[in-house]
Amino acid sequence: GQSLEQPSEVTAVEGAIVQINCTYQTSGFYGLSWYQQHDGGAPTFLSYNALDGLEETGRFSSFLSRSDSYGYLLLQELQMKDSASYFCAVIKAAGNKLTFGGGTRVLVKP
Amino acid sequence: DAGVTQSPTHLIKTRGQQVTLRCSPKSGHDTVSWYQQALGQGPQFIFQYYEEEERQRGNFPDRFSGHQFPNYSSELNVNALLLGDSALYLCASSTFQGNTEAFFGQGTRLTVV
């Protein structure tokens, strides 16, 4: 089978840094993606890691360790608008089929 | 570019009925995937269409079926609706090869009563 584990909820204050960890067990692996979803909204793509290492996109960075089946999303300089659910998702094959984790709800407080 | 569009946005059906949801992918995309998202959970993959064929399927019963048209748009059909089918149904478009970013529509909120 396959599974992805991530924390259910994280609370932090504006300006802080939050790290959302994701561990996965899957047969077959192309890469790990991260999506953001605001309440009532559509998931939107944040990042994708196919190789080990850190990918940086503005305030958000994502890391992957294939040998450890582990990745994380780093949110820096938190803003109120970053309050949302964040999902890690494994891509196993061509066609961009996504297997999602249960999501981490991030609450940013003033 | 209109992005991914889904219709309708909301729908209420009765148990046992059938429903059809529609999705138009982002311009230039040839692959449509459907997901079911229950409240407070991550999206679950239903199936994927490419070149008008179902390419991959998740762990959903045969009551869930779909179609892709020559213009790449897609339909999701659910027969014999159950209360447990109440969820947000998301459509995601991408290109089949070499693209790792999926673009999601706003979803159809289906309520079965």
Image (cartoon, rainbow, N blue to C red):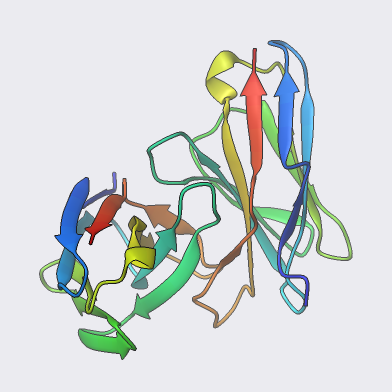
Residue A74 image position (x, y, % from top left):
21, 74
Viewer-nearest residue: A36 or A84 = A84
Which residue does the image show at 79% across and 35% down from the upper left? B20
Which residue does the image show at 12% across and 73% down from the upper left? A67
Residue B22 image position (x, y, % from top left):
79, 47
Instruction: Using residue B40 as the reference point, say whether residue B48 is left or right of it.
Output: right
Q: Check the image and name the residue furthest to the front.
A: A110
Viewer-nearest residue: B45 or B110 = B110
Q: Is residue B40 above or below residue B50?
A: above
Image label count = 0
Q: Is residue A72 above or below residue B37?
A: below
Residue B29 image position (x, y, % from top left):
71, 74
Q: Is residue A21 something one can see in this rendering? A: no
Which residue does the image show at 22% across and 54% down from the upper left? A25
Quadrant in the rendering for residue A46: bottom left
Q: Check the image and name the residue furthest to the left.
A: A68
Quarter holding the C terminus of chain B? top right
Quarter holding the N terminus of chain B? bottom right
Instruction: Using residue A85 as the reference point, say whether residue B18 is left or right of it.
Output: right
Q: Is residue A87 something one can see in this rendering? A: yes
Instruction: Using residue A22 as the reference point, say whether residue B68 is left or right of it.
Output: right
Residue B53 image position (x, y, % from top left):
74, 55
